[in-house]
Image (cartoon, helix red, strand yellow):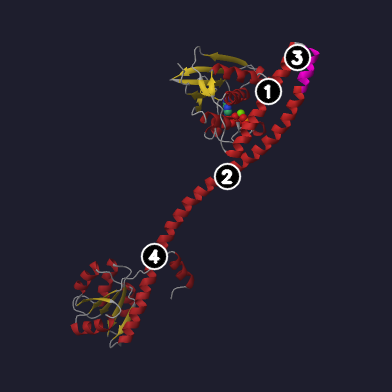
Amino acid sequence: MLDESLRSLIALHGVGETRSGGILIVDDEQPNLTVLRNFLEAGYRVHEAQAGEQALEIARVADLDVVITDQRMPEMTGVELLEQIRDLKPDVAGIVLTGFTDPPALISAINRARVFRFLKKPWQPDDILEAVRQASEHVYQTRAIRKLVGLLAKRTDELDASLVQVRSAQSQLLHLERLGTMGKLAAGVVHDLRNLMVSLGYVESVLEQRGVAPDVMESVQVGMQGVGNLIHTLETMHQFARGGTLTIQKAMLQPSLVVNDALAIARMDMSFRAHKVAVTIEEGLPPVHGDRQKLTQVLVNLVRNAVQATAQWRQIGVEASRKNGHVVFAVEDEGPGVSAAVRENLFKPFVSSKGEGGMGMGLYMAKLIIDSHQGEIAVLDRPSGGARFEVRLQPAEESP
Ligand SMILES: Nc1ncnc2c1ncn2[C@@H]1O[C@H](COP(=O)(O)OP(=O)(O)OP(=O)(O)O)[C@@H](O)[C@H]1O
Ligand SMILES: [Mg+2]
């Protein structure tokens, strides 16, 4: 009998009927076949054969659950027949009818042919019907279990595949969660910075009234511009963390403006000033259609990385040029180049080799911004050592 839980598994996975209802009866005496057929026909589809070879031919083409065979037949015994049928149809159950009473020989035959049941002659119809019922139930179970194992193996594969998907969704979610937290932090910092801006604005007006020296005035204004840019950057992060998208305000823009804005901001950083900076802006560059503040932010991030990667007094190159029909902004340095450990995930959030010193947001934000300009950002190795980051943008359609 099938175990209850196995039965419910079979039902759960919709294994269904596995039997064909086909029975093959084999006896060399026709009257015996007729008797068997008479009481089996009501419940089964009955095939019959009078000899082993004929039975094998039927077994090759017919769907069978059970074979009932006489043991003593000329040319091929019942057990020999079942052995051969087992090669053709391993899950068919065999019943052997015999008057043969030598137990050791029988047992070895049962093992060889894996006969389901022996019935001694003379048999009663009820004995046969009960043996066939049990044999057919046995066939049903064997086939159902095999089918179930196949189905479960397939579902296991499917589950493995979904598990991989779930894991990647989960890690994406983790990223988003951390981004969300960053977004909230950014909002808090923006709030404080706005207060700072108010105070700076007040200081600026007081200094103006008192007519301080222009260079003092200028450094206050540069400072205010720096804080303004910082607020803008943080707002971008906050906005992105909330909605997953960036709002880009595009306008016609000369590439040199972006370079100059970025350098003005970078100069506020002491370590930038401790490097040699080579700026190259190609003559007659076409404008791009872009967000001035956000493109500046990209360049500032690249310059900051270059400064951090390079020893003092080494050179950093910043350029705007035209290459293969694109406007290219590039920042290069004489540092060690991008390490293999971060290279593959360079533009993903929170990827940083700088420990406490970096959040791993600079290149991620840069890529978001460049993507929203339908541009490309890439890292190249400089032949002379160091890294070169390139941003490529389509030039704007120049108005006539
Ligand atoms: N010019 C460069 N030379 C060598 N490695 C670089 C360079 N620029 C970026 N990298 C590598 O890429 C990583 C990611 O840079 P990214 O700007 O995204 O983050 P970060 O600089 O570590 O931190 P954050 O910019 O958020 O302060 C860096 O930690 C560094 O390992
Ligand atoms: Mg950085």
Ligand 1 occupies quarter:
top right
Decide whether residue 177 is among the magenta residues.
Answer: no
Tell me the amino acid under the disc marked 3: Val
Decide whether residue 207 is among the magenta residues.
Answer: yes
Mark 1, other Cα within 10 Å: few <14 / some 14–19 / many ≥20: some
Q: Disc 4 marks which residue?
A: 146
Mark 2 or mark 3, which is nearer the start of the sequence?
Answer: 2
For the point 69% across and 25% down, which residue is it? Answer: 227
3D distance between C-alphas at marks 1 and 2: 33 Å
Q: Return the x and y of residue 136 as percentages of the image width and height.
A: 34, 75
Badge 2 marks a residue whose secondary structure is: helix
Badge 3 marks a residue whose secondary structure is: helix
Tell me the amino acid under the disc marked 1: Gly
Q: Is residue 389 left or right of residue 29?
A: right
Tell me the amino acid under the disc marked 4: Arg
Mark 4 or mark 3, which is nearer the start of the sequence?
Answer: 4
Mark 2 or mark 1, which is nearer the start of the sequence?
Answer: 2
Q: Disc 3 marks which residue?
A: 216
Mark 1 or mark 3, which is nearer the start of the sequence?
Answer: 3
Q: Quadrant of residue 103?
A: bottom left
Q: Disc 2 marks which residue?
A: 173
Q: Return the x and y of residue 234 as percentages of the image width and height.
A: 65, 31
3D distance between C-alphas at marks 2 and 4: 40 Å
Q: Disc 1 marks which residue?
A: 226
3D distance between C-alphas at marks 4 and 1: 72 Å
